[in-house]
Each structure stands twice: as structure tokens, then as C-alpha cells.
Image (spheres, rainbow, N blue to C red):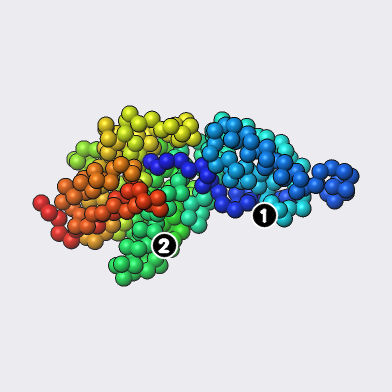
Amino acid sequence: MGSHGTSSSGGSDGCFAPGDASGLSSARRDSGEPRVSERVALARRDARTRLEAAGIESAEAEARLIVAHAARARTSLVLLDDLPETFESDLEAILARREKREPLQLIFGGAPFRRLTLETARGVFIPRPETEMALDIAHDWVREEGRQASDPLRALDACTGSGTLAAALLDEFPAASVSAFDVNARAVDLARRNCESAGPGRYRVFQAELPAADDELREFVRTYVPERPLDLVLANPPYIPEKSIPADPEVRDFDPHEALFGGGERGLDVPRAVIELAALTLRPGGLLVMEHDESQGEATRALAEVSGHFDTVRTERDLAARERFLVARRAQQVRE
């Protein structure tokens, strides 16, 4: 899947940290102890220094997030009047884990994605902010079809991980019915919780391995996708080539390998199966949006075109102008 953006682990100060900020009393502040602003400033400087020493490029931004989390801040750090009694100990515990390059999303137990904060867990692929663009593409397609986000929609999230795309679909398309699957049992449990929070009663999450062989794939569709034809298939499948070991410890050491490596020398075995899955399940005019590595744009377009099931195939670029999403529309008539 995508690269790991630790600097995108949160937003403004305190966005991860609802809770009770009752701490130092005015009497204690008047006793000569450092003021809240001084303690916060010292904590941010120390956190930044330690994160920089650990090799974390986004040390300044992460230091702010970590301090806000330890402070249980409901508002900006500069507006805090009190700090919890456990502020320093909580801060130390978080920094000790982050210095070992454990992702902030796991430390905090949640990852921001679109309008949601998704629950995270060890052993499950962590949502990435770059994947959010798949929802923008889906909204554009719905408008192009002359429909609205409030209209009924049948969708599938392939290789769902923590339920990232499925949950966002449920949240942003209030009449959507969404199915999702993953090979990882822990991911399936987590995806169910995230989908339940986003759209109770409108989802189905199941555990299954996506087969590569065509005959097995057809049986997969008959068994697991009875609600076809679908309007939309979204996927952020594993796509890293087998010999490309991720350099970032956050990815290499904490994301499950089955969520990273796409199979085959070029990492395209699973993406090819996703394309074929979409070809078998989408209605005429239905859309596939699949995230891939920036080097795989031409290869994934070729896979979609050679299938003969799509009449419009293109690649969408991300905000950094990198080719990151295959977008393919199911043909009205399939080419034999």
C-alpha cells in the first residue's frame, strides 16, 4: 500500500485528545511551580529534540501533537490553563514509543481520515492520508452521472485493512450499502468496528483471500459478492514489489507484510486480481478506483485495457503530481 506519512497523523493541537484537562490548581501555580505555558513550551522543545535524534523528519509537527495528546487538550495549547497530573509521565511514555519509530496512529489509537477518526490496531495496515483522494474521485464520478451523494450506491472496498475506504463511503454516501473484505482476521474485526461507527447496518465485512486464478476469482465472486452488480469498487491493495523493502521503520516494522507486498516481481498480482474482480462485479458504467505505486500507472492501465471490460481507463495524479490511482469505467458492452 501507500507510503507512511507520520506527519499526517493529526491536525490541529489536541485533535486526538478529548478528555478531562483538570490538573494543576491555581494554588499550585501560585506556589512557585512553572506556569502551564512554560511547562508546555519546555515539553515541546524536549519532544522535538528527542524526535529529531530518532531520525523523524516531522519532529516539530509531531512534538506539538504529542504534547497536546499528553495534555488532553480540547483547545490550542496556548489557551490551556491546567495540565493533568499525569502530563509528564504520559508524555514520556508516548515519546519512548515514538523514539522506537512506532507510528503515532498506533500510539494514539486512531488515525484521521476524511471526516473520521478511525480506530487503529497493531497488525493492521494504518490509514494513509493520500488514500483520501479515492473519495474525491468517487464524488466526481457520482456528479458526472447526474446523481447525488445521497442517492443509493452499492460499493465494495477490496483489501480494506482497517475499513478505511468502506467507512468513508458509509460516512459520505448516506444511502450507500458497502461490502468490504481483507485476508487478515484482525483487520476484519477492526474494519467492522470502524464501519459500525460510520454507518450502522449498511455494511458487510468478511474475511477472504482474493485469488489470482480466473476460475477461482469467479467462484470468489459467486460466493462473496451476491449483491452484484455494483456501482463502485474502491481498493488500496498491497502493491509493493517483492524485492522492494520499505525504508521507513514505521512501514517495515509495523504494517503487516500481506498488506504491503502485491505479489510477483512487479507487485502487480493483487492489483491485477482487483481489476478482474471489478470487471466481474461492476454494472455497465460502474467505476473502479484503485490506488497503486507511482511507478505502476502505465502497468495498471495496461491490465485494465487488456481485460476488455472497461471503456475509459486513466490514471489520476496526487497533489504531488505522482501517478497514484487507476480509474476505470466498466464498459457498456464487453469486448470479447
For numbered disc 2, what is the local secondary structure?
loop
Q: How many marks?
A: 2
Q: Amino acid at mark 2?
A: Phe
**Quadrant placement of the N terminus:** top left
Q: Is residue 310 above or below residue 184?
A: below
Q: Is residue 284 above or below residue 190?
A: below
Q: Of tags 2 and 1, which is closer to the observer?
A: 1
Residue topped by disc 2: 173
| Residue 84 visible to an observer of this rendering | no
Residue under the image location 48 percent in, 55 percent down: 114
Q: Amino acid at mark 1?
A: Ser
Give how far across and how far down residue 180 sits, in percent.
Answer: 37, 48
Estimate the spatial distance between the alpha carbons at disc 2 and disc 1, rounded to whole Å.
Answer: 32 Å
Residue topped by disc 1: 76
Residue under the image location 67 percent in, 40 percent down: 45
The quarter of the displayed image where residue 274 is located: top left
Q: Residues within 10 Å of mark 1 (few under 14, many from 20)?
A: few
